[in-house]
Amino acid sequence: MIERRSGQTFLWLGLGLAAVVIAGLAAWQLTPSAFKGAASSEEAGEIPVPFEEFRTIMVRNSPTRTIIEHGGMQLVTEEVLDLQLDLSRDSRPLINALLRRSQSDITSRKRMVVAVNDEEIHAKDLELIQDALITPEVMEVATESTGPSGELTSYRTTLRAEPKGTSTMVHVTTAIEIEKQLSRLFHGTARSRLEASTKKAAQEQLVALQKFSVDNAKK
């Protein structure tokens, strides 16, 4: 009888200890902790517009607002900080510009402030610096945040366009880093959602660029 009672006692003690451990683990999982997440995405697509015409469209009709707003943000302000035009390679700059065959090189820098419209990322207005290089052979644009805003610690997007036969090949990348307090239990979910948001932003920017180019072709 004594041995039986001793066995039952050890059983209950074991179950009680297991319950304490499980409760402790659950409490640990639910305790808010710093979540740092980073995700990047790259999208590529062909635009049925010759590169010469594509670069002219990008210069004459600024696509910034269209692309920004398709990427989950809203343009608040935009300011040109620097603009350089190199005509040394173009013997007929005015005529070629009118014919959309410009041979000039353009470099520019812009400062922008955007509002973030993403339910997965809580951030205030975000300041961005955009550097662009446009030549007869390639167009490269890099846009990067100047500092953190709310949960958003870093934002960067790039665009590279180059000729491909009678079309233009475009590559778009987006990289986002966030930091926020979140229960450990939801860190995996938050990381998956961040990756999805980043991929969606890159996809929508590419779609916006394709539509903008086709809509403004031959205008």
Image (tube, rainbow, N blue to C red):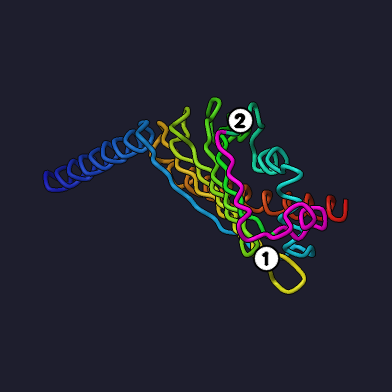
User: Taking 183 as reference, is 143 left or right?
Assistant: right
Q: From what the image shows, is residue 40 above or below residue 14?
A: below
Looking at the picture, tell me which residue is in the foreground, 143 or 19: 143
The residue pinned by badge 2 equals: 79
Q: Position of residue 137 (x, y in %)?
A: 63, 65
Residue 83 on the magenta span: yes
Say if the magenta span includes residue 78: no
Q: CA distance from mark 1 to mark 2?
A: 28 Å
Q: Which residue is mark 1?
A: 169
The amino acid type found where label 2 is placed reads Glu
Q: Residue at x 87, y 55 (%)?
A: 218
Q: Secondary structure at mark 2?
A: strand
Point out residue 1 in the picture as x, y percentages from the top left corner.
14, 45
Front residue of this view, candidates 118 and 189: 118
Left/right of residue 58 with respect to residue 35 in the rendered view? right
Magenta residues span 81-102
